[in-house]
Amino acid sequence: MKGDKALAKVIAVSNQKGGVGKTTTAVNLAAVFGALGKRVLLVDTDPQGNATSGVGIDRRKTAGSSYNIIVDGKAAAECIIKTEFKNLHVIPSSLDLAAAELEIVDRNHRESLLKAALAPIKGDYDYVLIDCPPSLGLITTNALCAADTVLLPIQCEYYALEGLSQLMNSVRRIKRMYNPRLDIEGVVLTMYDGRLNLTQQVVSEVKKYFPKKVYSTPIPRGVRVSEAPSYGMPVIYYDKGCKGSEAYTALGKEILKKEK
């Protein structure tokens, strides 16, 4: 570990509602940050493992996973895999994560197992992005305890704000009980179609709900963004010129600019 280096900023990408572009956002922002010269670690804590396969890693052939660091106490450094993409490393997911909550429920400090595991490697990265499961259980609690901020992808659909109050209650609870520094990084609008009245209504509702937290770069619906994971590639490597690549690159730059 490079002890004299600044510690990574840890961002949890979370929304307990499925199908909002959570994993797509985690994978593509991690790739964009890496392409822009930041050292990035993507931590996949979703049992579905889509962030792992989305960066071209077969989780059946890995020596260790986020399950091993949370449940077995394995060193995070032993579970990190270098991807073929610039500056991007990953701690893969495991199917065993589906049962992990039951295995850690009786542990002391069960909410901060991930935080403790990531602490020794935070000096090696500029950003750690955690892809959370689409639920508000103990694994998501671990991610939010380990994080400095939480990034919320919200789809421009009719039920966009449904479930958000639950998520915000969770964030507030974790802030109060375990992680007083936890803050909202920002809100990413996904599946955006500016031609639809509904989209405009959702955007204005979300902006009311999260004043000053909504990024000005929305992520449009796009075939290439949907296709890229099946090739094990972030969209900026799959098709650099498509709208989705341009949007995620602009979003990544917007987030980094805010950091400054």
Image (cartoon, rainbow, N blue to C red):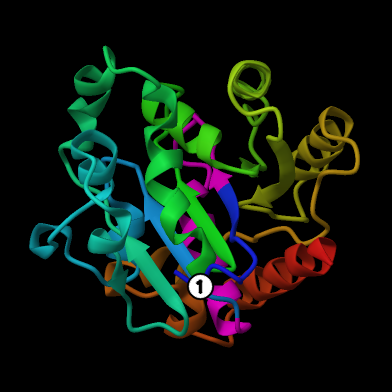
For the C terminus, the quadrant is bottom right
Q: Nearer the viewer, residue 84 or 194?
A: 84
- Residue 25, quarter of the rendered image: bottom right
Residue 19 makes an appearance in the image: yes
Q: Quadrant of the N terminus?
A: bottom left
Question: Where is 16 relative to 197, above or below?
Answer: above
Residue 222 visible in the picture? no
Identify the residue at image location x=46%, y=85%. Answer: 86
Q: Residues within 10 Å of mark 1 (few under 14, many from 20)?
A: few
Horizontal relation, residue 232 to residue 19: left or right: left
**Residue drawn at (22%, 31%) of the image:** 98
**With 196 as the anchor, is 99 left or right in this view?**
left
Question: What's the residue type where badge 1 is placed?
Answer: Lys
Please provide the residue range marked out in magenta: 12-37
Relative side of 127 to 42, left or right: right
Say which residue label 1 marks.
Answer: 2
Q: What residue is at 59 percent from the left and 73 percent from the top?
A: 33
Residue at x 64%, y 44% (from the top left corner): 148
User: x%, y% of residue 106?
Assistant: 26, 12
Residue 152 x/y as whole percent = 64, 41
Q: Quadrant of residue 4?
A: bottom right
**15 magenta-colored:** yes
Q: Is residue 176 left or right of residue 236?
A: right
Horizontal and vertical percent position of residue 140 = 44, 31
Q: Could you tell me which secondary element the residue under label 1 belongs to?
A: loop
Residue found at the very far left of the displayed protein: 61
Quarter of the figure with residue 73: top left
Q: Is residue 189 above or below residue 18?
A: below
